[in-house]
Image (cartoon, grey):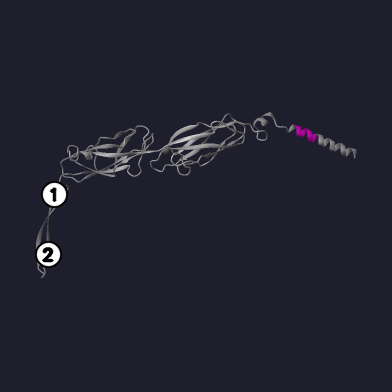
Amino acid sequence: MMKTWKLISMLFLAFMLGACDDEPAEGEINGGGTGVLEQADVSWGYEAKTVLKKSGFVKIPVKLSHAVNNTVKITVAAEDGDAVTIAREGIDFNIPEKVVTIPAGDTLAFLNVDLLDDGKVNSNREIKLNITGVYGGGKVSTPKSVSLLIVSNAFVEFEKSQWKTYESAAFNEAYKSTCLIPLKITGDLQESVTLEIEVIDSTAIEYQHFELKSKKIDVNPGDEIVYVEVIPVDDDEINYDRIFSLTIVPIEGGNMVVGKEKGTCEVTIISEEIMKTASILETEIVGEEGETVEMTVIGLCANGL
């Protein structure tokens, strides 16, 4: 019996010594997964930023004050508000993932915000985002909120999708205004831009049948209309109307975009020479009593104005 108790006592002592060896190390207390989690300050990378509606995805930085030995997860949420000044989630923007994960040892991650472009002129709107929770060893610091000011698009497009000018328009006062093809600007342009115009789908040969004078056009804030200048060439010959199309090259930078409905314009150069042709056709006409009468018909065709 004494031997049994002695054996039990030795086993208990060994268990106690093992328990003492399992005490967390200093590093585990300060950041290990099994001890007390290390605390780091969590904040946005900035308090406010202006973005363009046409930007698509915007990446907002979320940062830790220092690296920790565990994964930190941060939850975020957008504030609701009026539809005039505050952007609406699901209409003006989407947040694909509302949990930002910062792996152990890192100090930076990003929240993706998808800006939705409805192709319309809107007022500028603001997205307000808050950090709502921190998990895995962190605490909310300043700034806990971030604001994105969405600058709405300004649009440029041709006033008409089809335009007519005349071979003599460059020197004929009656037609001279047809050399200027109007471009319409809508919305609030934030800064000056330079538009580029290109010729596409042409049956008219540039420099032989017309000259595009305005391949680059400056547009400034406050402008509502600008013009593409085309100079037709009058060859004084009988020919068919000639057609070409103009297109606005997509714009880099700034808040101006090309309108979706009238980004191109088909231009017709009307020939002013009358083209006449005469044709003689011999035919037979059967009379009421079965008599056959031979007739010669002279036809006159006119093309042009």
At numbered mark 2, what does the secondary structure look like: helix, strand or loop? strand
Q: Residues within 10 Å of mark 1 (few under 14, many from 20)?
A: few
Does residue 66 appear left or right of residue 112 in this picture? right
Q: Quadrant of residue 31?
A: top right
Q: Residues within 10 Å of mark 2 (few under 14, many from 20)?
A: few
- Magenta-drawn segment: 14-20
Q: Residue at x 68, y 29 (%)?
A: 26
Q: Nearer the viewer, residue 294 or 149?
A: 149
Q: Would you say residue 18 sits in the magenta stretch?
A: yes
Q: Estimate the x, y position of residue 108 in percent, counting from the top left.
A: 54, 32
The label number, if any, that marks residue 75 in the structure image: none
Pick whichever of labels 2 and 1 is earlier in the sequence. 1
The question of residue 124 being in magenta is answered with no
Q: Is residue 19 or residue 86 the one in the foreground? A: 86
Q: Quadrant of residue 199?
A: top left
The percent coordinates of residue 20 (x first, y second) are: 76, 32
Q: Position of residue 99 (x, y in %)?
A: 55, 39
Q: Position of residue 106 (x, y in %)?
A: 57, 32
Q: Residue at x 79, y 34 (%)?
A: 16
Q: Is residue 124 left or right of residue 241?
A: right
Q: Amino acid at mark 1?
A: Lys
Q: Which residue in the protein does label 2 denote?
A: 285
Q: Is residue 266 visible?
A: yes
Does the rendering let one see residue 106? no
Q: Which residue is mark 1?
A: 276
Indicate the amino acid at tag 2.
Answer: Ile
Magenta: main secondary structure equals helix
> Residue 22 or 116: which is nearer the viewer?
116
Q: Secondary structure at mark 1?
A: strand
The quadrant of the picture occupied by the N terminus is: top right
Instruction: Determine the residue located farthest toward the right in the rendered image.
Output: 1
